[in-house]
Amino acid sequence: MWVFGYGSLIWKVDFPFDEKIVGFIKGFQRRFYQHSVDHRGIPGKPGRVVTLVPGEENDRVYGIAYKLNEQKQESVINHLDYREKGGYERTPVLFYPKDKRREPFEIIIYLANHNNPQYAGPADIDSIANQIVKSVGPSGTNIEYVFNLAKAMRDIAPEVNDEHLFTIERKIQNLLKFNTSESYSRTLN
């Protein structure tokens, strides 16, 4: 069994696996449309994490496929089901390895559909960035999540421009610069 990481599973792998492959799935877009009250936010003050939303046929979401060890598969799936409990469901899709010498194969993704209770839905980039800057949960700051995901995507697929992710990253960087400058000028007065 293979599992696809397109969010924190790219850079925060806390389960054993036998092999990993960089590649993509088609027909989806990675979006910060999922609330997180169990990892990157808290109840009443949720963070925002990524999920996949239906896209055009030629849309691609890059990430990492992990081949689960057969003997540990059940315990890893139980762990991932718990980790992704905030509205995600397992869904099979076709995975396309970046290495063209490998054939596409079926993989499991954790997908949060718009009917789940933590679905935040679309919002303008400024609102998403402002929410992320203010959110902290048991797994750390929401900012850390965004910066780690953006760095990981540049590492595994430097040729890919994940516009939604990188735009939010830039907005957060600008907010942090503004907040730091504003705080500094207040201390001078």
Image (tube, rainbow, N blue to C red):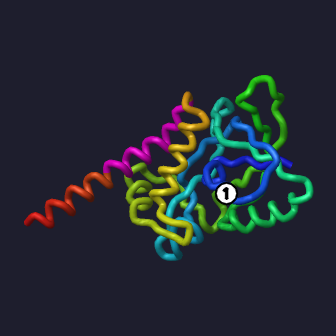
- Vertical placement of 62 versus 126: above or below? above
Q: Name the one closer to the observer, 178 or 44.
A: 178
Residue at x 45% of width, y 57% of height: 143
Residue at x 52% of width, y 56% of height: 145
- Vertical placement of 94 versus 131: above or below? above
- Vertical placement of 60 versus 75: above or below? above
Q: Residue 173: say if magenta.
A: yes
Q: Which residues are magenta?
A: 160-174
The residue labelled by disc 1 is 112
Residue at x 66% of width, y 62% of height: 115
Q: Quadrant of the C terminus?
A: bottom left
Give the quadrant of residue 26. top right
Q: Residues within 10 Å of mark 1 (few under 14, many from 20)?
A: many
Q: Residue 121: say if magenta.
A: no
**What secondary structure is found at the residue carrying circle 1?**
loop
Please state the horizontal and vertical placement of residue 76, each as a whole percent of the image.
80, 61
Name, please, the residue furthest toward the top.
Answer: 101
Name, please, the residue furthest toward the left.
Answer: 189
**181 on left or right of 34:** left
Please state the horizontal and vertical placement of residue 12, each as a whole percent of the image.
63, 55
**3 on left or right of 58:** right
Q: How many marks?
A: 1
**46 on left or right of 91:** left
**What is the magenta segment's predominant secondary structure?**
helix
Q: Name the one closer to the observer, 61 or 123.
A: 61
**102 on left or right of 158:** right
Name, please, the residue furthest toward the right.
Answer: 71
Type of residue at label 1?
A: Ala
Q: Is residue 92 visible?
A: no
Residue at x 67% of width, y 56% of height: 113
Please state the horizontal and vertical placement of residue 120, each as a whole percent of the image.
54, 61
